[in-house]
Amino acid sequence: MANYRFYVVIWVILVAATVLEVETRFISSPAQFLVAGIIAISSAKAIVIALYYQHLRYESKAIKVLPLLALVALGALAVTAIVSLGG
Amino acid sequence: MDWWTLFSFFLYIGVAAAGVAIGSMVYFALKNRSKTDRGTTESASALSRSRAREAVIFGSISAILLFALAVGSYRMTIYIQNPPVPSESLTIGVTAYQWGFKFQYPQNITTVGECTIPSDKPIIFNVTSSDVMHNFGLPDFKLKIDAIPGRYNIIWITTPTVSGNDTLTYQIRCYELCGTGHTYMIGSLVVMSPTSFNEWVNRNTSNKTGGM
Amino acid sequence: MGILYLVTSIYFLIVAGTLAGLVRVQLAVPNNTLLGVFQYGQTVTLHGLIMILWFLSPLGIAFANYFVPLQIGAKDLAFPRMNALSYWLYLTSGLMLASSVFLPGGGPDNGWTFYAPLNTSEFSPQPGVTLVALSLGILAASVTMSSINFITTILRTRRKGVTWTSMRPLAWSMLFTNVLMLFAFPPLALGVVLLTADRVLGTVFFSSMQGGALLWDQLFWFFGHPEVYIVVIPALGIIAEIITTFAGRPLFGKKLFIGELAAVTALSIGVWVHHMFMTGINFDVREAFSITTMIISIPFEGLVLNLILTLRKTKLKLTTPMLFALGALFFVIIGGITGVFQAYVVLDYAFRGTYWVVGHFHYVMVGTTIFALIGAIYYWFPKITKRMYNEKLGKITFFVSFIGFNVLYFPYFFLLDMPRRISVYPANPEWWPLNLTATIGALIFGPAILLSIVGLIRYFKNGKAASTNPWGSSSTEWTGEYAIPPTDLPVDTTQILSNPAEETENQPYGGDKGKPTYVPAIIAVGGVIFSLGIALYLPVTILGLTVLLAATVKLFKDGISDKFAELKEEAMETWPFGSVSKDKLGMWIFLLSEIIIFGSLIIVYLYVRVTSAAWPNDTQLHDLAIGTTNTIVLLTSSLAIIIALQAMRAGNFKAAKTGLAATLFLGLVFLWLKLGFEWPNLFGQSFFPTLSGLPASTYYILTGAHAVHVGVGLVAVSYLLLKVQRNKFTAENHSAIENVGLYWHFVDIVWMFLFPLFYLI
């Protein structure tokens, strides 16, 4: 029973973060801050889901490393693709 | 330095490296070959010792060679990367299309297939494409650049000296597969003396070629 | 399975080899009229695609299938039925690709690199191009499944004693190759999906002026460069196996060798832009990749040195396989060095698009890889067929092929100015003697290889019986140290389709017997029909989907969990993944490929948005209320499935069922809101890819791809519900719920990023 509560708490945090994100839409602030803030919140939500719902927090280091490897490869593609556009 | 000199430098090192590698491989294979025996006389401990030392030595030699080659080619890299200022050169817009090359001159002249330029001058080519990806290549200058729709890429050369009424003709070729006409996508670069070039410009300003 | 891959890949070799022969004959003399330009274009394109993707890699996979389990003491791969599916997808996609030339308009003639915008409908209208794009997609699926299989097998199902340090070079090279496959094929799959969408749905990813050409370039080469290492690394592993056996000594510096393979693997993901040096991109990016390309040559040459030094201080036998292996090594030295030349941008200005490049890659792909693979066929011939090939014939074919190869390809390095992929060339004294020489080389090389193969086939039937370990190798597949009785039965079709687990006493197994299943083959056929529909006539896709549905239903009835014998936990070597079950590890590895493909898709979106001067105000276009609701719906569905898992663990079946049902319901709500409300609304506002260009293209493809993943997830959740209903799960045995959950949460995470991208910024 206690375990269910834990996941519900996580859910509440995620929903609250979503509401927060939506609110930023209505704040008038320079675009860069908004975008940075939204990206930060989304990433935080993703990490929370990964750590707690996907149990990554409790898995062995070997498993934890796997998604990081994928993200590193993606990072290389993202940075290169976008930077290479500048003359 | 020019491309061939740099390339020869690479070639010497490359051939030497290949020679050492292939030579040692062939040497060991022949020297140690046997129709009957097989197997090593080295002890197990000798065989399984760490090869970290060899790795570091070999890795360093390779890195030094590669770095030497990089240093050797650095000046040329920077040279190619920095076209001269537009005021001292002639800028020609090149549009590659299926299947040929169009050239636009600052004097509002457009030619198709043949690009006439003056000698002893830096020429900047501002290359793009009007349809698919092509490549504007000057094999005699060992230079080329992709022609990409929506982008303008720059390549530049300095033309050699030509005097009087002589002309030098170089080939322009497309080096990127661009459809069924790729095989025949050829142009020419004609270099003439500055005076002849000016005459050419005057002739063509009054009657523009092509109907674009 | 190994045999199937072997035979099929040889078939594709012969097809693509014939195409190569046609190329050389056409180019033998100037202004030849044997092939028209369009025919030549198709020949060259199909030759490249088939050789690289349907022959070289699959032949490596064949040996991996056959010998990696033997080397590591596993009975079979971790997921045998998925392995069968990989094979059928490989076969059907290859046949589909080859058939593209018979479609109206012919096949693709845009080179194996399929550059944009040449590959769009505007410039290549023939449906054959779409069909080939889809074949590539299906092959990508096949390869990704293969890689999940092999990585899980090698990481998790090794027999006790097969430690990381003792594992054989072939197994190691296959591990690295499969890791690269996992990372490299998703961007290719993405590229062909986007291309197909462009061609069939009217999206504008590759036709737009905002970087369409470069977008394809980045995606394709992010795949393309690791792909060539995927081809070469197995060859290096094979050479290591052959040399160590015939030199009768261990590899020089085995740990160093493994380290070098690891370095090459990791670095190969960071060099792809060297295929784009002339595209006019940012100078610093070019220089950075020039440097990474230089760096990767260091461990690569180290590998070569390790192999050469293994020839020292020992006595060796120059048998046929050994000769092929040494030949392969010779070629990798020349191929590798000519590659290093191209790392330097300055030289590349001359090399780009010329035969120098063609010479370089044929030396490594054909020279190194084909010679290594043929050497492998000779090497393992006695093991697979229990017979001996003819040594004399083998050696003759080696020498003739070796000479023929060099006569064929060495002239290419002198054709510095000749463009690639031209079908005729003028009577230029610099070109035609070299071309003629090359053709003569082809006429020697091709038949020699063919003779080798024919010889092997003949001795397969008539060769002398061979002993179990004729080479006296100490490698575990020969010594039988990890053999799993019944050992190596001769090939027999029931074994290929089923893999019956015959139990004998005192074996370290558990599990039930398996039975043959045709589901993988049916899925492959369904996929082909679906693809034909997309390329040719849309209604046919319904038939394809029906077939897939039928296959899915059958799969549900059979049950997903593999019924094949598996090693018991105590008998396995599991560091560092011991705490994770085989199935969970497989799911995580699958999720890695998903991270890459969705991540690349999001990168595509960012790329086009950043390069576009004008972008409509998304926030006004997309309904924030629905978007937010959907986000919360999806988050709740994640909660539902994790509660179902917790309930299951506690033995509360009722709560588990409720949780799963809730997940299913909420997922359906999500899809209904999106597809039933949002999309029709947008259609009403004329927000179509063809009318609104890139913003619409990206929106529909991203949310569409996500919706498809939600749909597939719902199918999986329904399966779980069915199993709970039938009481097939217990409080201890319910890993499927957890694994589907992992997938479901991943789909949720993707939405966490899509939501702000489309609704908030």
Image: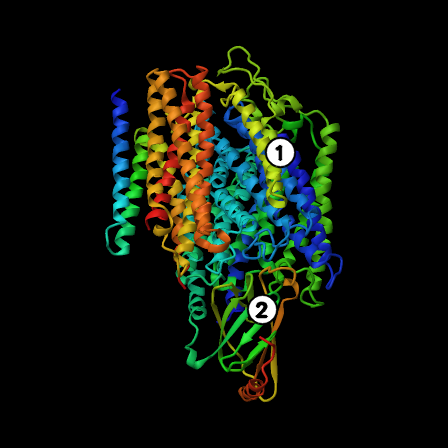
Residue, x 51% and y 59% (percent of image)? Answer: B13
What chain does badge 1 belong to? C
- Crowding at mark 2 (Cα within 10 Å: few <14, some 14-19, many 20+): many
> Which is closer to the viewer, label 1 or label 2?
1
Question: Relative to C716, does residue C299 appear above or below in the rendering?
Answer: below
Residue, x 37% and y 44% (percent of image)? Answer: C754
Question: Relative to B186, does residue C481 appear above or below in the rendering?
Answer: above
- Crowding at mark 1 (Cα within 10 Å: few <14, some 14-19, many 20+): many
Q: In this rendering, does residue C26 appear at all?
A: yes
Residue B104 location (% of width, % of height): 53, 76
Residue sitting at the far front: C684
What chain does badge 2 belong to? B
Secondary structure under badge 2?
helix
In the rendered structure, find residue C35 and report the number of the disc placed on it: none
Residue, x 55% and y 47% (percent of image)? Answer: C196
Going by the numbered disc 2, the residue's amino acid type is Pro
Question: Relative to A85, does residue C698 appear above or below in the rendering?
Answer: above
Going by the numbered disc 1, the residue's amino acid type is Val
In the rendered structure, find residue B139 and report the number of the disc placed on it: 2
In the rendered structure, find residue C525 and report the number of the disc placed on it: 1
Say which of C46 and C731 sits in front. C731
Mark 1 vs mark 2, CA separation in Å: 49 Å
Q: In this rendering, does residue C246 appear at all?
A: no
Residue C537 location (% of width, % of height): 63, 44
Relative horizontal placement of residue C272, taking residue C88 as reference (left or right): left
Residue C132 location (% of width, % of height): 61, 46
Residue A22 location (% of width, % of height): 28, 45
